[in-house]
Structure formats: C-alpha cells, structure tokens
Amino acid sequence: MNDRGQISAAEDDGLDPSLVAEARQLFLRPWQFIKGVPSMEFLPPEGPAEIAFAGRSNVGKSSLINALLAQKGLARTSNTPGRTQELNYFVPGGHSGEMSDLPEMAVVDMPGYGFAQAPKEVVDRWTGLVFDYLRGRVTLKRVYVLIDARHGLKKNDTEVLDLLDKAAVSYQIILTKADKIKPPAAQKLRQQTLEAISKRPAAYPEVLMTSSEKGSGLDEVRAAILTAIRR
C-alpha cells in the first residue's frame, strides 16, 4: 500500500489525515542509533523531546521501534531476554545528538524487564538506571509501555505502572502482537486494559493496538507520539 493509501486507512480509523501525514513525515525518514547509555552520566544533553519504550523482555519492543521507523535492524532484536542492558538512543539521521546538533526528538529503547536469567545484581543495576532516568529526565514526554496481547497485564507490568505513577511520568499502553489473537479477544483485552488503568493518575486514557509483523496500528502510534511531544 502506498503512503496515500495508508493515510486513507488511518482516516477510516478516525485519525486526522493531516496529523497522520505529518507524523509519517517525521518517522519515515532515515534514523540512526547514536549511543547506548549504561549510567546517567552518559545521557545526551537535554533538549529535544524524548519518547521512551518500555516493556517485558520479548514483548516485541525492538520490533515495534524498527516498524515505526521503517528500518529493519535499527533496534537490536534478540530471543535472549534481557539483552538490551542500556538506554539506547535513536535520532533522525544527520544529527549527532550533541548540544550543538540536537534533533527535534529522540526515541529511547529502555532495558526490558521481567526476565529471570540475569544475575540479581545485573537486574538491580539496570532497574536503578531506568528508575533514575524516569525521575530525572525533564525532556521525557511520554513512556509507551508495551504489553503482549496474548498475555495482558502481568504483575511486573503493574509494578512498572506503579513506578510511573509515583514518578508522575505520562505513559500510554500499547498492546503488541495483536495479530496473534482473534479480533473479539483483542477488543475485549483493550477494554479490560482501559478499565485497569482508569484510576491511574499518570496513564493516558487510550490503549493502542499494534502488530509489527502485519504493520497494523503504526500510524496510530506515530500520531500519538507527535501529539505527545507537542504538549
């Protein structure tokens, strides 16, 4: 399907076609990885709006980032839970991310959580990095928390939502791998998830659904991100 056809499909889903077109212009350009951040002192300068993606290991986080930016292999995917050990920064091509060359926005791939194979001290170190980032990054506009549509919210997901509420960081739920369940079950899960977050103070009251494999829901996520960074 060409760009115009995809925008028309998004319009059928109730999205503003001009917003979709602008969001696609932002995301469907060359992007690049600029650095992995193992601790807070290595963070890029604060300046551009940042959007972060969080989720359990193997939830499809890297696959979704690659699909949103239409670049296979940009974010590293792995079948090994916990492989992403740093905050990985991506920016539009042609920018270094240094103070003299800041892009309009950055995408941050956060370490996955919920894996059991890594030693406790490693998990604690990654967890501390993520918590410090959430509490201390003024330019962080929203965290997108990815939930596997086949499993729904799990205990460690709700613990992360508790943290985000406590840190007063705006977040939105994305249900991934929606193509792996039947449409009625997907809609039921969306409603159940909306009810589960309805009283959470930092939760954005809309749940998105995606399939990186099928390409569904990507324009909705892009439009949501563009709206979030403008707030």
Image (cartoon, rainbow, N blue to C red):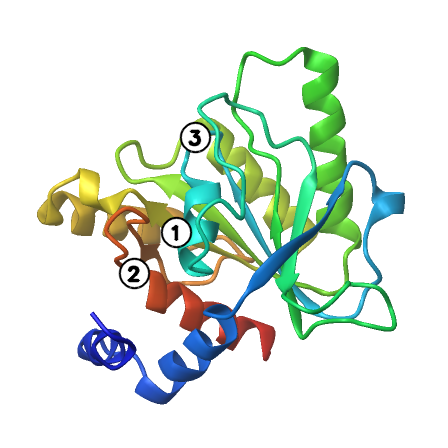
Q: Determine if residue 103 is in view.
A: yes
Dot 3 amino acid type: Asn
Picture coordinates of residue 168, whole percent (x, y): 66, 56
- As displayed, is residue 155 above or below residue 6? above
Could you say where residue 223 lies in the image, as x and y percent from the top left? 42, 73
Question: As displayed, is residue 144 above or below residue 158?
Answer: below
Viewer can see residue 169 = no
Q: What residue is at 72 percent from the left and 19 percent from the top?
A: 122
Q: Judge by depth and name the residue closer to the eye, 33 or 83.
A: 33
Picture quadrant of residue 104: bottom right
Graded by Cα atoms within 10 Å as few (under 14), some (14 to 19) or many (20 or more), the crowding at tag 3 reads many
Looking at the rendered structure, the secondary structure element under dot 1 is strand
Tag 1 near tag 2, CB within 8 Å: yes
Of the image marks 1 and 2, the number of the one nearer the N terminus: 1
Q: What label sits on residue 217 in the rendered view?
A: 2
Q: Find disc 3 in the rendering and name its residue.
A: 58
Residue at the spot of label 1 = 174
Q: Which mark is residue 96?
A: none
Q: What is the spatial separation of the Cα atoms under label 3 and label 2, in whole angstroms?
A: 19 Å
Could you tell whether 177 is left or right of 73 in the image?
A: left
Label 2 sits on a secondary structure element that is loop
